[in-house]
Image (cartoon, helix red, strand yellow):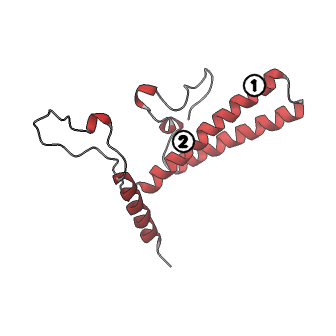
């Protein structure tokens, strides 16, 4: 049975192989009329020591995005009057519990909720800014 270190090394090696397959960004490609020798394209550094944390960050980012989408859908249903009071209460409790679990998982991996908001360059950030009164811990 492989040890944890062997499994982490295997995951890190697989990630490194996958990142080598990523195409270069347009700014990283040499221009045809550029006389300088081409420089290697920037790649994501797959560090075996941080691969678990980085993977958790990606997973938690996706879960947070889905949580926020579910929360917005729930608010639309409440505003439209589609839910009974009991359903509203149960939905609110579930969403608060999910937020608490997300915060706990972030703390376990040394992340904050703000760390999950990936910068998409010219598109802005992945997650919308927090609404006034919300705490992003």
- Residue 66 percent coordinates (x, y): 63, 39
Q: Which dot marks residue 12?
A: none
Quadrant housing residue 60 = top right
Establish if 131 lies above or below 102.
above
Q: Is residue 104 left or right of residue 119?
A: right
Q: Does dot 2 land on a helix, a strand or a loop? A: helix
* Residue behind mark 2: 61
Q: Residue at x 44, y 62 (%)?
A: 11
**Residue that label 1 marks:** 76
Say whether residue 49 is visible. Answer: no
Circle 1 packing at 10 Å, graded few (<14), some (14-19), many (20+), is few
Q: Quadrant of residue 86?
A: top right
Neighbour tally class for label 2: few under 14, some 14-19, many 20 plus, Cα within 10 Å: many
Q: Is residue 112 above or below residue 53?
A: above
- Residue 37 in the image: above or below residue 126: below
State the image coordinates of residue 37 (x, y, percent, origin top left): 12, 42
Instruction: Please name whichever residue, 131 or 21, is drawn nearer the observer in this view of the structure.
Output: 21
x 89%, y 30%: residue: 84
Image location of residue 64, percent across then percent down: 60, 39
Q: Relative to residue 108, is residue 124 depicted above or below?
A: above
Q: Residue at x 37, y 58 (%)?
A: 17
């Amino acid at each position: 049975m492989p040890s944890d270190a062997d499994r982490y090394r295997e995951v890190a090696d697989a990630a490194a192989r996958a990142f080598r397959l990523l195409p270069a960004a347009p700014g990283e490609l040499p221009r045809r009329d550029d006389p300088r020798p081409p420089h290697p394209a920037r790649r994501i550094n797959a560090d075996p020591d941080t691969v678990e944390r980085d993977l958790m960050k990606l997973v938690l980012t996706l879960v947070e995005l889905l949580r926020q989408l579910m929360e917005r859908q729930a608010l639309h249903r409440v505003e439209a009057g589609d839910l009974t009071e009991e359903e509203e209460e149960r939905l609110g409790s579930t969403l608060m519990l999910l937020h608490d679990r997300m915060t706990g998982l972030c703390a376990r991996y040394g992340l904050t909720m703000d760390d999950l908001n990936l910068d998409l360059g010219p598109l802005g950030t992945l997650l919308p800014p927090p609404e006034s009164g919300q705490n992003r811990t």
